[in-house]
Image (cartoon, grey):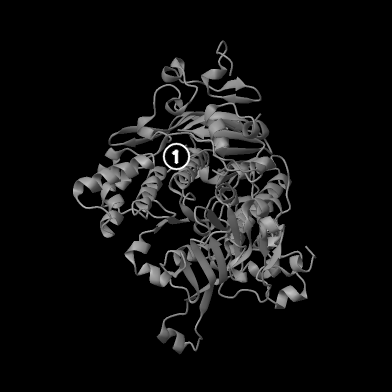
Amino acid sequence: MPDRAGTPVPEAPMLEAIGVSRVFDVSRPWLQRTLAGEKRLTLRAVDDVSFAIAPGSTLSLVGESGCGKSTIARLAVGLYAPSAGEIRFEGNSLSVARAQPALRRRMNMIFQDPYASLNPRWRVRDIVAEPIRAFKILDGAKAIADRVGALLAQVGLSPADGERYPHEFSGGQRQRISIARALSSEPDFLVCDEPTSALDVSVQAQILNLMKELQERLGLTYLFISHNLAVVRHMSDRLGVMYLGRIVEMGPGEEVFARPRHPYTRMLLDAIPDLEMVGRARTPVGGEVPSPIDPPPGCAFHPRCPLANARCRTERPEHTRAGPSAAEVLVACHAVAEGRA
Amino acid sequence: MALLEVDRLTVEFPTRRGTLRALDGVSFSIGAGEVLGVVGESGAGKSLTGASIIGLLEPPGRIASGEIRLNGERIDTLKPEAMRHIRGKQIGAIFQDPLTTLNPLYSVGRQLVETMQAHLKLSDAEARSRAVGWLREVGIPAPEQRVEAYPHQFSGGMRQRVVIALALCAEPRLVIADEPTTALDVSVQAQIIALLRRLTREHGASVMLVTHDMGVIAETADRVAVMYAGRIAEIGPVASVVKAPAHPYSKGLMGSIPALGHRMARLAQIDGAMPRLNAIPPGCAFNPRCKRVFDRCRVERPDLLPAGDTRAACWLYAEGAADA
């Protein structure tokens, strides 16, 4: 396994990202831009990101808005093509894998907003059956109806719910429908982009429990995207912390939570209001996430970092290894590498 | 005497298919300088409670019964004109989205000056210098220059700071903050909470903090009210409600929150969902989802009963009930 792809994974990874970047053109239309004499404006949403996900495990990516985590979710299922680098699904380049229905059906996605991701004009049974029909997994109305009924039962709904429309369901039930649809193509790999952030906490608990049960029962592999560290801690085996398009710290969830190394990870862990904080004050970290159109030079976190020095302001930190060999963590921080942290 | 008293407040929405009762007999009080957290899931009636207090209930919603008293005087029956003097002057409001709270066409300085001059007798020069002072107090860098800036020139966190300045600049006694940090990134959330807590303490204002984020409540509030289906399920000191909740719903709610400190194999889960307003069951509204339900819960609605350090609307705590 190449050095940059992260801590070695014993098995061949299900999904692997190797030096992936994605650049968006955010300049104004050609005529306006030319008249105003402006240059092209690009936004580097994802910048040289590498990771690997072992079969049956969960990798979570966590970060604040604008850090590129949703772009990675879309890259991972092939909804965007990388501007540089490569994504491999079971060793095949994703662009090749996407062209083969047999491979394509093995990955699916659960979206954030269960109100926007279900077609309001379709009955639930048609929503759930669409991947089955699209990939021609089953033939005959009876076989498809039976399968849809079984899928709905699997996510805790009743097979009779298939006759209803999405508006008749609550947010949590709609997310169950999204999960049933995602499972209908019999995938091995699911990308979950903030699947519970639109839900109330008690409903979030139901959905997270369901996702864990399904993972155990069906051996699913998850790429889990969230801004909520507590949710990520609950769900993940491995964890990547993102800041302005880069993974600044990545390692086993237990290790990262027990001994956060990157100053940004520490700040995030410190900043989160937690039930255990009753009556305790905290010192909030100043500043906000800079615009990804014009990221700071050197380490992108340096304007907010208490440990920043001249090197951090000019030279971009590469990943260095830290932590015990059994639970190795990659950290992109000069202060950690120099032992100043 | 408490600063704010809400007494058996009931809010109804008449519809063609019958009247929906969105708030049903909600009673609580907020003392001077106190922070009351109001938590609950969407549709529980938290925001509606806040809107009723500041007199911004959207028609056709109306207060069907009950009283709201500020400093002992009823404010729920005031005419809109009289209410306008209370809103801003006595009760400040902070809403979730700072971009829709601020007027995009006026500079933030002009908005601050206008708000202060509407409620306080200030000359233009005085109001302007106070506006700069408020921006400095909420942590806006270079306030002398930024006072001329427009809302779109601020980032989300900075905008919410401006909104806090606007809510506090007429020196209200009570601030109603409805999900003030929900639209912000976590690292900015902590800054805004700390700011709100410091400023309201310095100015002696009471706060009603409405949020679905239990972590925010745990850090900020003195007391907490847990709402469910338009009613208060439990109310008490923050430490007791968070660490040792009495009501089965509060227990389920606290257990369903993933913790940062340790990893659980499985989250506690309350099966089902909160009932819709047109289908609230008789008796205790939580009874169909409650693991400890018994006959009385299905027919008779419980009042808030003493339960340890808190008060819970639950028959388990009635005198003569089996162990709670």
* Residue B113 seen in the figure: no
The front one of B67 and A86 is: A86
Which quadrant: the C terminus of chain B?
top right
Check the image and report above or below for B302 versus B160. Answer: above
Residue A298 position in % (x across, y down): 68, 75
Check the image and report above or below for A220 versus B219. Answer: below
Q: Residue furthest top?
A: B320
Quadrant for residue A1, please give it.
bottom right
Q: Residue furthest front?
A: A11
Q: Residue at left 71%, top 43%?
A: B204
Residue A310 position in % (x across, y down): 77, 75
Say whether residue A260 is left or right of residue A96: right
* Residue B209 seen in the figure: yes
Residue B69 position in % (x across, y down): 56, 32
Label 1, on which residue?
A: B43
Check the image and report above or below for A225 versus B198. Answer: below
The front one of B42 and B115 is: B42
Q: Disc 1 marks which amino acid?
A: Gly
Which quadrant: the N terminus of chain B?
top right
Q: Secondary structure at mark 1?
A: loop
Quadrant for residue A294, please give it.
bottom right
Say whether residue A254 is left or right of residue A155: right
- Using the image, name the chain to which the residue with label 1 belongs: B
The front one of B318 and B19 is: B318
